[in-house]
Each structure stands twice: as C-alpha cells, then as structure tokens.
C-alpha cells in the first residue's frame, strides 16, 4: 500500500510539476536569508546551458531547442535511477523519430559513466557532470530531475524524483506526445513486453 501511495505522489509531481521534493530556499535559523529567485520554472525560458558531451563536442541547449523539444534528465547511476532508465530509454526511442531530443546528464565520474552507458546500451545524448554544475544552473537539488523543454526553449514540465516502476516516465511521455501532437507511447507497457 505504501508503494502505491508513493507512486501516486510521484505521478502527481510529474503531472503538476511546480511542486518540489525539497525546499531549496530555506532561511537560516534566524530567518534572515532571502530566497533566491526561481528562474527555472514551468512556463519560463530554459536557462542558458552548455556542457561537453561524451564525445567532447559542446552541447548547447539553445541550439537543441531550435530543432525540437528536449528532455533533459539530471540523473546518476543509483539503483532507483538505474531501474528508471529503461523507461526513459523507451520514451526516447518512441519519440526520437518525431523530433524529441533526450539528454541525460550524469553526476558521476567519466569512467563510471562510460562503463554504465556501455552496459545499458544507452542510445541517447549524454554528458557527465561530477561536480553538479548542471543542478545549480537548473536550480534543483533533487536527483533525478527531468525538464521537458518545448521547441523554442520554454519549460513545459518539470518532474522531480525517481519512480522505478516508470510512472514518471509515463507521465512525461504524455506531455511529450502533446508537444509533438502525436499519440502517447505507453513507455511502461513497451518496457514490460521486453522482459
């Protein structure tokens, strides 16, 4: 029952992504700190963001969003993110031919990510950010956090947290389908057929 409640909460977060698991703007004990302005939010332009891809080429988010919608996934190789990756790979495969670009950014060492990518046969664009600079730029501390960005750079959805049974990926799949004006792929069902 508790797994169902947790899953329902995570789906709600994906569907109503203005909610975050962590309050990142807490004041100090005296209440003196002012919250930093939230500039990365639904309906706002995505931040200016560049990172080196695994092949050494620079990935420029602004250039990617000129081509079509982009799903940026700030993630790691923990067991929850690892289980969830299959659903995001299915999501990527379902929509890449329709214009979606998927970018996974791992907060791990280069060596660890290279082994992980090979073992998972990752087919999407990816980069490594062991220092977590991407998390600062996207104003999140939650691992993972997914940002669905429309063509042109406006943030359509933000989904915080990990859901190993694929509910977050499935909710994002519906939002991607809406952006691309196509039928939604059931990423959970497709992944289950592989097993």
Image: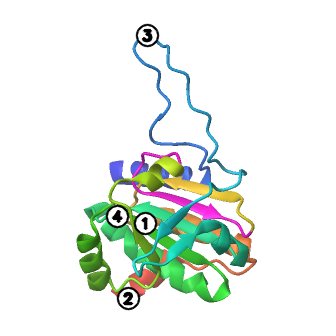
Badge nearest the viewer, 2 or 4:
4
- Quarter holding residue 64: bottom right
Q: Looking at the image, can residue 3 be seen?
A: yes
Label placed on residue 105: 1
Q: Nearer the viewer, residue 146 or 139?
A: 139
- Characterize the local packing of mark 3: few (<14), some (14-19) or many (20 or more) Cα atoms within 10 angstroms: few
| Residue on which the image places disc 2 | 194
Quarter of the image with the C terminus is bottom left
Q: Nearer the viewer, residue 4 or 184?
A: 184
Estimate the spatial distance between the alpha carbons at disc 2 and disc 1, rounded to whole Å. Answer: 25 Å
Badge nearest the viewer, 2 or 1:
1
Write the residue at 72% across / 59% down. Answer: 154
Badge nearest the viewer, 4 or 3:
3
Residue 190, percent from left and from top = 47, 84
Tell me which numbered mark, 2 or 1, is placed earlier along the sequence.
1
| Residue on which the image places disc 4 | 81
Tell me which numbered mark, 4 or 3, is placed earlier along the sequence.
3
Q: Are marks 1 and 3 in contact (CB under 8 Å)?
A: no
Tell me which numbered mark, 3 or 2, is placed earlier along the sequence.
3
Estimate the spatial distance between the alpha carbons at disc 3 and disc 2, rounded to whole Å. Answer: 54 Å
Write the residue at 29% across / 70% down. Answer: 110
Estimate the spatial distance between the alpha carbons at disc 2 and disc 4, rounded to whole Å. Answer: 19 Å
């Amino acid at each position: 029952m508790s797994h169902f409640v947790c899953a329902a909460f995570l789906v709600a977060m994906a569907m109503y992504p203005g909610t975050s698991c962590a309050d990142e703007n807490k004041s100090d004990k005296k209440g003196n700190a002012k919250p930093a302005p939230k500039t990365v939010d639904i309906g706002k332009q995505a931040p200016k963001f560049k990172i080196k891809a695994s092949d050494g080429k620079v990935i420029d988010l602004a250039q990617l969003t000129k081509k079509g919608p982009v799903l940026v996934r700030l993630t790691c190789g923990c067991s929850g993110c690892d289980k969830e990756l299959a659903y995001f790979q299915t999501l990527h495969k379902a929509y890449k031919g329709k214009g979606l670009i998927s970018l996974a950014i791992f907060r791990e060492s280069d060596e660890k990510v290279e082994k992980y990518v090979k073992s998972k046969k990752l087919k999407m664009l990816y980069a490594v950010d062991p220092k977590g600079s991407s998390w600062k730029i996207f104003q999140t501390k939650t691992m993972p956090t997914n940002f669905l960005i429309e063509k042109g750079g406006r943030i359509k959805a933000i989904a915080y947290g990990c859901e190993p049974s694929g509910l977050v990926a499935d909710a994002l799949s519906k939002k991607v389908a809406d952006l691309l004006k196509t039928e939604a792929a059931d990423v959970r069902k497709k992944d289950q057929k592989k097993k």
